[in-house]
Image (spheres, rainbow, N blue to C red):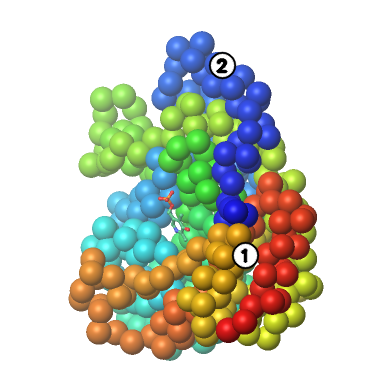
Amino acid sequence: MIPFLDIKSINYQCRDELVEACARVIDSGWYIAGKELSAFEQAFADYCDTEFCIGVANGLDALTLTLRAWKELGSLNEGDEVIVPANTYIASVLAITENNLVPVFVEPNAETFNLSPVAIEAVIGPKTRVILPVHLYGQLADMPTILEMAECHGLLVLEDAAQAHGASLGGRKAGDWGHAAGFSFYPGKNLGALGDAGAITTNDAELAETLRALRNYGSYEKYKNLYQGVNSRLDEIQAAMLRVKLTYLGQHTEHRRCIAKRYIEGVTNPVVQLPHCRNDEQHVWHLFVVRCAQREALQKQLKIAGVETLIHYPVPPHKQSAYALYNDLSFPITERIHREVVSLPIGPTLLDHEVDSVIDALNSLDL
Ligand SMILES: *Cc1c(COP(=O)(O)O)cnc(C)c1O
């Protein structure tokens, strides 16, 4: 079976370095908020070309705590509205509702699947305070237009960059566009830890300070608590793993781009709709998502041909039981995307002949 993503083989590539880093942490006797964390935060800020990086426990916390920090700083109030793409992963929405803010779902651009500026403009109202673009599948949303709109209406921009480590548009990286950005280092992400981890990047010193306190019980200084914070820290072991993995991110991204290019050039079957990619941007291909009206049959035939595929995502947030309040809303583009998408195998250790087999299987589908 050609796996969708082989995380074990990815980590096996740098196993010796990971083991060495792990031993370094064990032998240091210091496991939380130490040198590994500050070194990783500095390295990841440098990678994103931002001034600050604040490590937290996971990607959901990165988004949740940033909105929380804006509340503490007085830039946001409960009940304010946050514009979010309807076709995102549920974490983007959970971060909003956890803060008692109101998600305002908008349809994506039907070609890129990313947040559509036209749709944003249509829902901006007196309670709108934040735009939360998601760089879905590793492709930047139309950030120049979104930033212009945000500036014009005095809105904050929080990027959900959980799928877009290193993606850029006109040379400017994901994480460096909004007032802040949330990243996830879940093991299957383009930069993956060996457990849970996440981070916020920002160029705003006050926000960075507030986040450093919020992730650590609301405390800047031991036993002095300014906020009712949480415990959401990126521990030393995971920071050490991420320092190793970050040195491989560039080559992993290049490999993903080569695979995407081969798929785009090789898949000629008209029943398979290929993803759209702007030519001034650097997509990082977290996922290679095609669309097909007969998705079930496609998945079944690929499985017989020995190709594993997944669906990102089968049910949009507004149709989840957790959001019964929004179940009656209708977003035809989003719902169609959720009905038709299939993610093909892509990853830093996928071999050329495996890519060829996937292409052959797609070109010989009989639907
Ligand atoms: C993975 C992901 C998250 C959440 O990250 P976790 O580290 O799993 O909490 C948020 N948003 C998007 C778009 C994601 O893909």
What is the quadrant of residue 14 in the picture?
A: top right
Q: Is residue 354 above or below residue 311?
A: above
Residue 233 place in picture, x, y as percent: 39, 35
What is the quadrant of residue 127 in the picture?
A: bottom left
Q: Earlier in the sequence, mark 1 or mark 2?
A: 2
Residue in view at x 48 percent, y 49 percent: 184
Q: Is residue 34 above or below residue 150?
A: above
Q: Is residue 109 visible?
A: no
Q: Is residue 68 left or right of residue 1?
A: left
> Foreground residue, 251 or 70?
251
The residue labelled by disc 2 is 24
Indicate which quadrant contains ligand 1. Answer: bottom left
Residue in view at x 45 percent, y 16 percent: 30
The residue labelled by disc 1 is 305
Q: Secondary structure at mark 2?
A: helix
Q: In the rendered picture of this protein, how many numbered marks are placed on residues?
A: 2
Q: Is residue 44 above or below residue 133?
A: above
Split into 4 quadrants, where in the image is the N terminus? bottom right
Mark 1 residue type:
Ala
